[in-house]
Image (cartoon, rainbow, N blue to C red):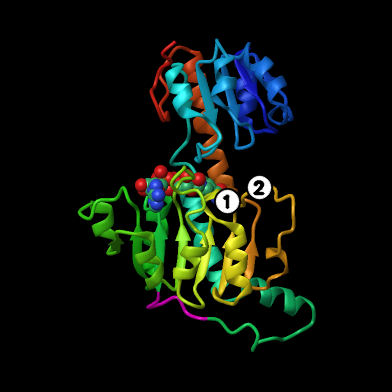
Amino acid sequence: MDILISEELATAAVDRLTEKFVVVRDGSLWKDPAHLGRALGDARTIMIRNQTQLTADLLAAAPKLIGIGRLGVGLDNIDVQAASRLGIVVIAPLDANATSVAELTIGLLLALVRKIPRADRSTKAGDWDRKGCMGVELADKTLAICGFGRIGRLVAARARAFGLRLVIFDPFMKADSPALLESGATLTKTLQEALIEADFVTTHSPLTAETHQMFNAQSFGAMKAGAFFINTSRGGVVDEAALLDALGRGHLGGAALDVRQIEPPTLRVGFENLDNVILTPHLGAATIEAQTRTFETVATDLDRLLSGKPAVNYVNFASPRR
Ligand code: NAD
């Protein structure tokens, strides 16, 4: 088997691979690790989105695997260290989604501060609620950006056009980095310092042991009264109970969540009842352009690996080491 596809994926790029390679597709495989493990035993490469969890144990049971194609950016569902130890190339189209996520982030920010979803709902219901939909301007306010990588930088560039002042928290960013200097932003040493300054906070860090629930009761407590919070990164960076509490007490002005601790959420925890909360179903990369770039990039690299050529969009090494 050349390519195992363990999630529901259907695009022209996958069809092209099917014409050239032996492709096994089972869209429900990600739900059943035992079955997935057996299928992996025979696979040379695997193509996944964000549902398949490729743990060290599963990878150890895949002796022929030379490449993992991840159709997306977050790598928290792959044990990349284990893959690297085993000599497996991990392919991810790191540049494919950033513009789409940055644009969604700005869209959510505008929708929050101008109460666009509430205005839409009430007007369609027959109201003309101009008073209840009073908003605030972005110009001359402060936006805190947590994580100044590909997406954070694109958000910064767009936010600048709205006249926002920028503060950035990113422990890996150097004060003399050209990207930072170009953004005109202030770099803070701690998350807390960024939060206390901000009228709006957006997070763009990866989900790691350090960032897990970094937005918790303490961080929300540090934010200004009435500030807005946006998460288009990973649900795991937020303690949802603490966010609900901060919203319920009226400490925060509102929140927009594109990503959740559990996706899709199995429980209606309370965000659904709040008028100042916007929920979207992980739409950051859900644009025609981002999806086309993502599939094309991963399909091309899997084709290259299977044809004995080095991958181009890898996160560890270009050619298999096994
Ligand atoms: P990136 O690697 O380019 O940037 C991440 C930045 O976060 C880096 O600058 C890094 O230094 C910083 N960082 C690391 N640890 C940090 C910490 N403890 N505190 C603050 N910053 C920290 O990644 P990117 O392409 O900008 O993507 C960011 C994240 O967005 C991804 O990891 C992914 O989880 C998420 N994402 C979501 C969607 C979506 O559909 N909503 C789509 C793409 C990516």
SS for dot 2:
loop
The amino acid type of the residue labelled 2 equals Ile
Task: For label 2, count other residues whose C-alpha is less than 10 Å away and answer few (under 14), some (14-19) or many (20+).
Answer: few
Span highlighted in magenta in the image = 136-141
Residue 33 on the magenta segment: no
Residue 58: horizontal and vertical position, in percent? 59, 21
Q: Earlier in the sequence, mark 2 or mark 1?
A: 1
User: Outermost residue toward the front?
Assistant: 218
SS for dot 1:
helix
In this picture, residue 192 sits left or right of residue 216: left
Task: For label 1, count other residues whose C-alpha is less than 10 Å away and answer few (under 14), some (14-19) or many (20+).
Answer: many
Q: Which residue is mark 1?
A: 235
Which residue shows up at 47% across the image and 54% down it?
Answer: 214
Q: Where residue 262 is drawn, which disc sits there? A: 2
The amino acid type of the residue labelled 1 equals Gly
In this picture, residue 55 sits left or right of residue 173: right
Q: Quadrant of the N terminus?
A: top right
Residue 95: horizontal and vertical position, in percent? 43, 41
- Residue 141, above or below 314: below
